Every structure is written in structure tokens, then in C-alpha cells.
Image (cartoon, grey):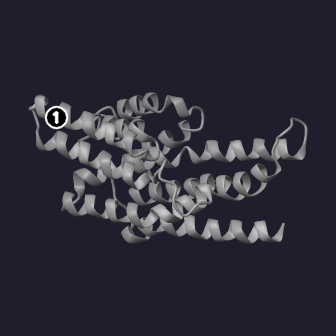
Amino acid sequence: MYRYNLPEKFRVLDGSALKIIACITMLIDHAAVCLIFNSILMPNAPIIQGTDLYNLYTFYKVLRAIGRTAFPIYCFLLVEGFFHTKSRSKYALRLLVFGIISEIPFDLCIYNEMWHPSYNNVYFTLFIGLLVIWAWDYFKDRWYIQLPIGAVLLYAAHFFHTDYGWKGVLLIFILYIMHAWRVPQVVFGLCAMSWELPGVILAFIPILFYSGKRGRQLKYFYYIFYPGHLTLLYLLSVYLINRI
């Protein structure tokens, strides 16, 4: 039973709906980087106010703001999955495997490089975040074990330069700690992501309207969507660059 929640009649979005919102906004975000910034803006820099490039840059910033919606939703769904999965070990393994699979498509799409070790994809952030809340749950009431493990894993996210880094892992932990209180969960989650304002506000509105139901399950589609859309965007950017 969730406390401090919206009335049931307003909780109209299931897990599947949240995943679709996250996928669409993530696609918008990565398309802005790959197709606009990398393919058009960067080759034609500098960007001067009042020019067509500046107008395109403004549009790019709007798309990136919309894209801030995706990550908090994925973190929220990760926490929900943690409480409902039949096997946490398999859940963690899937995140790790798809992180490895996604790294080359991520580097190609975002950095136009086959290998860019200074920044790694979001699956690794989600994987480390899952390890944090798993350890916190497993060593319940043993803070002298929980705190060192949590600190090491937060540092690991920073050290390996995962997408959103230690701040992303901290968001996952906050959403986990506040799991039973939906409205405070949203408020504290928004505070944790305040450095991404104002776009990140769009993420916590659908979370607030989450019904607690899983919805239609297309599990592996959502896992594959991440490396799949990155690959397609990169190929499209190569085509556009060759056409220009």
C-alpha cells in the first residue's frame, strides 16, 4: 500500500505507458545529439545569435530538455522492477549484458567513435544502481556494511564515467528509499535531479500518475530498443552527412 499517493482515479498510467514515454523521449534526446548537434551544428560552428544555425541550436536545446524525461522514468521503473522481479540476479545480469552490447552503438551515436571510454552508456548506471539498492536491502539494519558498499558503488559510477554518473545512482537510491511514499518520492527525486531543470520536471509528472500495474509486457523489446535506436540513428547520421 502506497501512502501519500494521488487518488486512485488519477493513477492512469501503467508500467508499459511509462516505458513508451521513456523510449520516445530518449529517442528525441539522442536524435538531437546525433542528427542535429553532431551532424549539422558541430561541422558548421561557431554558432552566432540571429543566424539559422543559432535557431537550430535553440531547437536542439528544446529537444534535449524534453529528453531529460527518460532517465528518471527508467530509474523509477528499475526500482519497481527490483521489488517485483522473480530473480534479482538475472535482472542485474540483463542490465550488464545489454550495457556491454550497447556500448559501441552508444559511442558511435553520441561521439561518432567506435570506442569512447571516457563516457559509458546508461545501462551501466542502472546496473550499479541496482547493486546499491540490492546491497542496501540484503544488509538491512547493518549500516556499517551498507554505507561502505554504497560509497564504493557510487564511486564506481564516477570512476567508470557512466551516463549521469554517481548522481544517477543516487537518484535510484532515493527512489528506492522513498518507494512507499509516492508524492514525497517524486518531490525528493525532482530535488535530486534539480541540476537538470527545467526539462526533468516532465519526467516526474507521469511517475506521479503511475497506477502500480505492469501493463503489457514486451520486456526484451525495451531492452533491445536502446542499442537498436542508437545504431539506427548513427546510420542515419552517416547517410545525412554523406548527402550534405
Measuring from the top left, give residue 105's x and y in whole percent.
52, 65
Total marks placed: 1
Q: Could you tell whether 132 is left or right of 206 in the image?
A: left
Measuring from the top left, give residue 136's x and y in whole percent.
18, 39
Tell me the element at label 1: helix
Above or below residue 146? Residue 78 is below
Q: Could you tell whether 74 is left or right of 67 in the image?
A: left
Measuring from the top left, give residue 212's x and y in whole percent.
33, 51
Quadrant housing residue 156:
top left
Q: Residue at x 59, y 48 (%)?
A: 67
Comparing 17 with 7, the one in front is: 17
Quadrant housing residue 2:
top left
Task: Please name the amino acid that badge 1 sits on.
Answer: Gln
Q: Is residue 241 visible?
A: yes
Measuring from the top left, give residue 77's x and y in whole percent.
37, 51
Q: Residue at x 38, y 46 (%)?
A: 76
Quadrant housing residue 165:
top left
Q: Residue at x 55, y 54 (%)?
A: 26
Q: Is residue 77 visible?
A: no
- Residue position marked by numbered label 1 in the rendering: 146
Q: Residue at x 55, y 64 (%)?
A: 114
Q: Could you tell whether 133 is left or right of 215 in the image?
A: left
